[in-house]
Image (tube, rainbow, N blue to C red):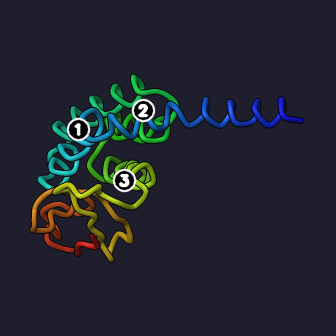
Amino acid sequence: MIRSALSAVALVVAVLAPIRAAAADLPTAVLAPYLQLQTALAADSLPEAQAAAKTLEEQAERLGPALTIAGVAAGKVAGAADLKAARAAFGDLSDAMLALAGGETGGTDVRIAYCPMAKKSWLQKGTEIANPYYGSEMLRCGEFKK
């Protein structure tokens, strides 16, 4: 009985270790290209968005299974045929990033923003909304939640 309980604890530790490691690397390895991607989409720049997404995809792959969903979504942005497809994939990526962050930004200068038109959130720096879902069409649409 004690042996099976210890085995269960060891399994939980083994599963959570990569997640803890990924969370420690999140700001430097994944958050920077994510923020570049958000800025590029807000500026309607598909090539810059794709380059940032490719970097994020590579970093997510390097960090392991805890970032698989974010990596897959970043890969979809990197391979998007147009801004509309890139923005749709960015929504999935943002959901994954917010889940990894646990809905918190860790006291950094990164904030959680929300677009009521797209019904999606994203992470961004700064004090002025720069909407990645609509770019120049509705750049200031949204509000900061945190």
| Most distant residue in the front direction | 2
How far apart are the two marked residues, 1 and 2, measured between alpha carbons? 18 Å
- For the C terminus, which image quadrant? bottom left
Q: Earlier in the sequence, mark 2 or mark 3?
A: 2
Q: Could you tell me if the residues under marks 1 and 2 are in contact, i.e. CB atoms within 8 Å? A: no
Residue in the foreground of this view, choosing between 8 and 138: 8
Query: Which residue is drawn at the image coordinates 24% and 58% (left, top)?
Result: 107
Q: Earlier in the sequence, mark 3 or mark 1?
A: 1
The spot of residue 12 in percent (x, y) is 65, 37
Amino acid at dot 1:
Pro
The spot of residue 58 in percent (x, y) is 34, 25
The spot of residue 37 in percent (x, y) is 22, 44
Q: Earlier in the sequence, mark 1 or mark 2?
A: 2
How far apart are the two marked residues, 2 and 3, measured between alpha carbons? 20 Å
Residue occupied by mark 3: 94
| Most distant residue in the right direction | 1
Residue occupied by mark 2: 21
Amino acid at dot 2:
Ala
Residue in the foreground of this view, choosing between 5 and 77: 5
Q: Which mark is residue 138?
A: none
Mark 3: give few (<14), some (14-19) or many (20+) Cα within 10 Å: many
Q: Which mark is residue 33?
A: 1
The spot of residue 80 in percent (x, y) is 34, 40
Query: Which residue is drawn at the image coordinates 45% and 37% (left, top)?
Result: 20
Instruction: State left or right for residue 61 relative to residue 78.
Output: right
Amino acid at dot 3:
Ser
Query: Which residue is drawn at the image coordinates 39% and 48% (left, top)?
Result: 93
